[in-house]
Each structure stands twice: as C-alpha cells, then as structure tokens.
Amino acid sequence: MDALDLTAMTFGASGVINFAMRPAVIRLLHRMGAFASMGAPRTFFYSDTLPLRVALLPFRSGADRALAILYLASWLSFLGFGVASIVLLLSGPQSA
C-alpha cells in the first residue's frame, strides 16, 4: 500500500463518516431551534459550510459539542485528503 492508496482510503472513509453524521447534526439543529436560521440544510452536500457553521454554535451539552467537532473534523479531513489525493495523482510518475 503506497501513499496514494492510503490517502484515497482515508479520503473515502472521512467522506462516509461525514455523510453518515449529517442526519444527526440536522436533528441537533432541530433540537436547538437553529435549523431554519442555518438555511434548512436537507440535502447531502460536501461543498456547503454547514460543519463550520455548526461548530460555531453555542452548545448546552458536551455531547452536542463533541458531535459538532467530530462532524467538522470529518469534513476537514475529507477536504484535506481529497486535495492530497489529487496532488499525489498529479505528482506521480508520468507515462509517455
């Protein structure tokens, strides 16, 4: 397993984690009454800034804060490892 395989695997895992956590975060927003003010995010997009906006909300419990931080970390990991995968693909050996 080389660096590209490891990076691509981590990219995929972080994307799946982020996608799987989004319904829990949306339930959290409903519980906090912040769903409408966040633009009613119902669709599953990796390109929106919902993880960053959720992490900046004031939370009442540690579990809610942990969910938001884990959601943000999986999103940042998804973006970072996606860029790293592209860089590794472009910097790899070129064929003629």
Image (cartoon, rainbow, N blue to C red):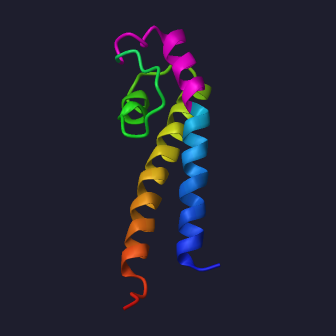
Q: Place residue 38 in its image quadrant.
A: top left
Q: Place residue 94 in its image quadrant.
A: bottom left
The answer to whether 74 appears left or right of 54 in the picture is right
- Residue positioned most to the right: 1
Q: Main secondary structure of the magenta part?
A: helix
Tally of numbered discs: 0
Can you give x and y, in whole percent of width and height, for residue 14 in the image?
Answer: 56, 50
Instruction: Indicate yes or no whether the magenta region holds residue 32.
Output: yes
Q: Which residues are magenta?
A: 22-38
Q: Which residue occupies the foreground of this view, 32 or 8? A: 8
Tell me the quarter of the image containing the C terminus: bottom left
Task: Tell me if residue 78 comes above or below residue 95 in the rendering.
Answer: above
Instruction: Indicate yes or no whether the magenta region holds residue 60.
Output: no
- Which residue is drawn at the image coordinates 39% and 61% (left, top)? 83
Task: Tell me if residue 94 comes above or below residue 30 in the rendering.
Answer: below
Tell me the quarter of the image containing the N terminus: bottom right
